Amino acid sequence: MRSRDDKPSSRVRPVWIVSVIRVNQSGVQMRVAGLIVGVITSAVLLIGATAPALAQAREPDDRQAVIEEAQTQKSRTLHPYVPSKGEQLMQRVEDALVYPVETWHPFFENAYRGGGFAPGAGYMKHVSAFSFVDVRGSYSIRNYKRAEAEFVSPRLFHRRGELSVLGGWRDATQVAFYGVGSDTAPDDRANYGFERPYASALLTVRPTRRLLMLRGGLELTRWRLKSGAGSDPSIEDVYTPPQLPGLRASTTYVHSQGTVGFDWRASPNYARRGGFYGVTVHDYSDRDDALGFRQVDYEVIQHIPILRETWVVSLHGLAETTWNKEGQEVPFFMLASLGGGSNLRGFSSWRFRDRHSMLLQAEWRIMANRFFETAVFYDAGKVAARTSDLDFNGLKSDYGFGARFHTPLSTALRIDVARSNEGTRLVFAMSPVF
C-alpha cells in the first residue's frame, strides 16, 4: 500500500497552476486586443460609409442656398420685356390685319387677278363684341377699281358658325385672254374688260368646332363685258361671238355653292401644320338660260412640320371641272384658268384657259423668326377640254424662291420670284398662295 508519503509533492502543484493561469491570461489579452482592433476597424468603416451620406444630406441645403442667391441676384436686374422695333412693327400689322378694331386699315386686294399693285383703304366698325362691318376699296395701277361693304359675324352657334354678307362692285379694264387650250402662245393675247356688281351671303359651320367643315353660299351677280384697254388688241377685234361663247354678253347669274371638307389648320390665311381636304360644288344659273353651267372643285392642302416647325413642307392640289347645262354653254370668261401669282406663278395671269384644270404645288418653307420665313417652291399644272386629259403629260411648270412676312394667323406680305419657260416674274401679294 502506498503510504501518505507516496502522495504527489505539494511543491509541484502550484507551479502547474501558475503556468496554466499565465497561459489563460495571455489568451484573454489576445482576445481583448483582437476585440479592440475589430471595434476600431468597424468604427472606421462606419465613419467612412456615413460620411458621403452626411455630405449628401447637407448638399440640398447648399444647393438651395445657391438657388436662393441666384434668385436674389436676378431680382435686382429684373425689368419688363421690351419688344424690338421689328416685333412692334409686326404687332401693329397683326392688329390691323388680323385683330382690327374700329379704325382705318390698309386694303391691297385687287379687283381681279392681273390688275397690278392696288393700294386702298377700309374702315371697320364693330357692331357687337365680335361682329363688325367693313367698308373698303382699292384702285390699281391698271385702272382696276373695287368697292365693297361686308358684314361678318364670326361666332354664331356657340362659336361653331361664321356668317359673311357682302355687297360690292368691281371694274376691270384689261383682262388677258390667250385663247382656249394649253398650246396657245404669249403673243396671242387679247384684252377685255367688265363691270360686275354683286351681293352674296356665305355661311360656314363647324359642327364639332374642329375638323368637319360645312359651307354654303348664295350670290347674285351681273357680268357686263366691254372692250379691253392696254397695248394689246381688244378681244372683239380678234374673235366673234360664235367663236367665243359669252363675247359681248351681259349675263346675270344666280350662283349657289356648297362645300364639305375636313380642315384642321390653325388659320386658312397662315398655317405651319394641319391640312384641308374638301369638295365644292357650284351652280351658275343664267337668267337667260344661255350661259349656265356647273363646276366641281377638288382641293387638298397639307402642311408637314419638320424640326419643331422650323421647316415645313407644304403641298397643294386643286382640280376644277365644269359642265354646261343642257342647251347652254360655258362663257369664255368663266372657264377654268391657270397663270398668275396664286397658281402658276411663272406665267402671266389667265395664261391658260379651258373646261377643266389641274394644279400641283409644293413649297419648302424655312422659318427665320416668328415673323419672317423663306420658301423654295415648284408649281405644275395643265388645262384640258376633257377630264380624262387631266394627267401628268404636258404639264406647264415653274420654280422659284419666296419671302413671306406674316403674323401667327395671317400673311401680311408675300414676295415670290418665279421662273418658267416664258420668263421670270415677280409676285407681290397680301395673301398666302395656299
Image (spheres, grey):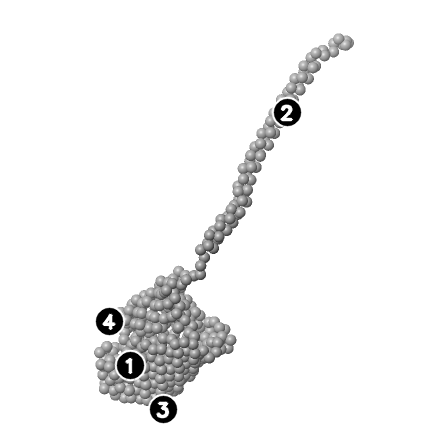
CA–CA distance in space, label 4 to label 3: 42 Å
Q: Nearer the viewer, mark 4 or mark 3?
A: 4
Which of marks 3 and 4 precedes in the sequence?
3
Secondary structure under the numbered disc 3 in the rendered image: loop
CA–CA distance in space, label 4 to label 2: 112 Å
**Residue drawn at (50%, 51%) of the image:** 68
Label annotation for residue 423: 4
Which of marks 3 and 2 precedes in the sequence?
2
| Image quarter of residue 229 | bottom left
What residue type is disc 2 on?
Answer: Val
What residue type is disc 4 on?
Answer: Gly
| Image quarter of residue 278 | bottom left
The residue to which callout 1 is attached is 143
What residue type is disc 1 on?
Answer: Asn
User: Split into 4 quadrants, where in the image is the C terminus?
Assistant: bottom left
Label annotation for residue 288: 3
Label annotation for residue 28: 2
| Image quarter of residue 247 | bottom left
Q: Nearer the viewer, mark 2 or mark 3?
A: 2
Residue 357 seen: no
Q: Nearer the viewer, mark 4 or mark 1?
A: 1
